[in-house]
C-alpha cells in the first residue's frame, strides 16, 4: 500500500513539474526582435569601453572589454550584444540576457599581439510587454575603439585619440591598413554580386552607432529607429549567431570582415555584405517599408 502511495506521489510530482515547465516555458528567451519603440522606457546608461590593461608576456598584451547598460525601469527582457573588430576583422563577441531585468554588465579580457586598431559596437536591447498582449521594444547603441602599438621599435603603448606626432603617425598607418583590407573585401563582394554602387549609400557597420540620434538618410526619427532595429535583428540572426550557407551549414563569424551596409537611395531595401574568414561571400537583403 505504501509503495502505491509513493508511486502516486511521484506521478503527481512529475505532472506538476511538467506543468510548471510548460508554464514557465513562456518566460523571456534570448532573442532580438524589433517591435515599435516604447518611448517611456529609456536607457539611463549604455556604454561600451576598451581599456589597455598592459603586457601579458613577451608576445601578447591584454585589453579589457566592458559592456554595461541600465534602463529606467525593470522590463520583460533585457539583452546586450557586442562585437569586437581588429583591423576590420571580427575577433570576438559578447552576449548576455536576463528576464525581468533592468541592468546588464559584461566584462572580458582579450589578448592581442602586434599593433592593431580595435573597434567595438554594441546593441543594448529591451523587450516590453504591456496590457492586451502589446509588445514594444527599446534600443540604444554604443561603441568604442583603441589603438595598441606593439612594435620592436618602440615601447608597448595605447591611445584613443592621438596627442603626439608619434601617435598620429601610428593612427594613420593602422587606419590605412584597415581601410585597405576592408575596401579590398567590400569591392570583391560588390563585384561578385554585381551591385550598382551609384544606387546605394555605404555605411560601415561600426558607424551605425551615430544613428542613435541622427536621422538615417532623411528618414524620420521613428522610421530610422525601425530600420536600425530591424537591421540589428537581421544581423543577430544571420551574422552574430553564425553565417549560414545555401547548403545549411553554419560558419562561425569570427574572422569575417566588418559588414558593409548598403542603403538603397530610393529607400526600398538594405543590402548587407560580409566575407567569411574562408573567403565565402554572404549577402542579406532587408526590405524597407515607408508606411508608418
Image (cartoon, rainbow, N blue to C red):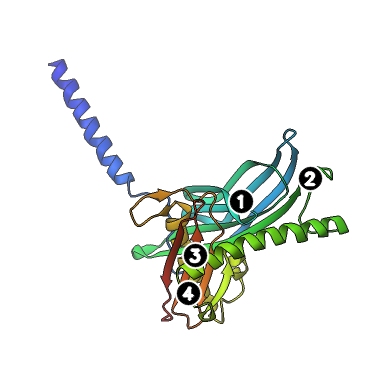
Task: Compare marks 3 and 4 and give the one earlier in the sequence.
Answer: 4
Q: Mark 4 = which residue?
A: 195
Q: Earlier in the sequence, mark 3 or mark 2?
A: 2
How dense is the environment of label 1, judged by Cα within 10 Å: few (below 14), some, or many (20 and up)? some
Q: Residue at x 50, y 70 (%)?
A: 191
Residues marked 1 and 4 touching at CB (< 8 Å): no
Q: CA distance from mark 1 to mark 4?
A: 38 Å
- The secondary element bearing badge 3 is classed as strand
What is the secondary structure assignment of the residue under circle 4?
loop
Real-space Cα separation, disc 3 to disc 2, in angstroms: 33 Å
Q: Which residue is mark 3?
A: 273
Query: x%, y% of residue 82?
Result: 56, 53
Which residue is at the front of the view, 128 or 213?
A: 213
Q: CA distance from mark 2 to mark 1?
A: 32 Å
Query: Depth check: 220 or 242 in front?
Result: 242
Residue 153, horizontal then vertical, whole percent? 84, 45
Q: Which residue is mark 1?
A: 68
At x 76% / y 45%, what residue is drawn?
150
Q: Nearer the viewer, residue 72 or 21?
A: 21
Residue 268: x %, y % from top left: 44, 79
Viewer can see residue 206: no
Amino acid at each position: 500500500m505504501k509503495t502505491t502511495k509513493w508511486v502516486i506521489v511521484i506521478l503527481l510530482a512529475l505532472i506538476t513539474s511538467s506543468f510548471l515547465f510548460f508554464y514557465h516555458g513562456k518566460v523571456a528567451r534570448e532573442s532580438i526582435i524589433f517591435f515599435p519603440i516604447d518611448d517611456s522606457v529609456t536607457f539611463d546608461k549604455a556604454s561600451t569601453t576598451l581599456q589597455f590593461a598592459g603586457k601579458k608576456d613577451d608576445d601578447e598584451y591584454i585589453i579589457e572589454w566592458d559592456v554595461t547598460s541600465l534602463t529606467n525601469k525593470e522590463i520583460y527582457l533585457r539583452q546586450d550584444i557586442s562585437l569586437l573588430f581588429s583591423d576590420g576583422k571580427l575577433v570576438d563577441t559578447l552576449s548576455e540576457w536576463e528576464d525581468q531585468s533592468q541592468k546588464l554588465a559584461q566584462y572580458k579580457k582579450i589578448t592581442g599581439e602586434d599593433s592593431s586598431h580595435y573597434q567595438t559596437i554594441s546593441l543594448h536591447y529591451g523587450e516590453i510587454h504591456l496590457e492586451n498582449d502589446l509588445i514594444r521594444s527599446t534600443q540604444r547603441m554604443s561603441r568604442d575603439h583603441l589603438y595598441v602599438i606593439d612594435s620592436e621599435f618602440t615601447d608597448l603603448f595605447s591611445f584613443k585619440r592621438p596627442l603626439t606626432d608619434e601617435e598620429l603617425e601610428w593612427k594613420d598607418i593602422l587606419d590605412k591598413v584597415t581601410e585597405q583590407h576592408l575596401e579590398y573585401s567590400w569591392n570583391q563582394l560588390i563585384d561578385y554580386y554585381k551591385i550598382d554602387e551609384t544606387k546605394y549609400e555605404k555605411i560601415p557597420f561600426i558607424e551605425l552607432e551615430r544613428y542613435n540620434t541622427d536621422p538615417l538618410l532623411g528618414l524620420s526619427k521613428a522610421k530610422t529607429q525601425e530600420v536600425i532595429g530591424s537591421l540589428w535583428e537581421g544581423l543577430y540572426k544571420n551574422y552574430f549567431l553564425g553565417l549560414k550557407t545555401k547548403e545549411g551549414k553554419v560558419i562561425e563569424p569570427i574572422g569575417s570582415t566588418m559588414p558593409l551596409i548598403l542603403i538603397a537611395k530610393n529607400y526600398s531595401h538594405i543590402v548587407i555584405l560580409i566575407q567569411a574568414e574562408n573567403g565565402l561571400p554572404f549577402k542579406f537583403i532587408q526590405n524597407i517599408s515607408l508606411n508608418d
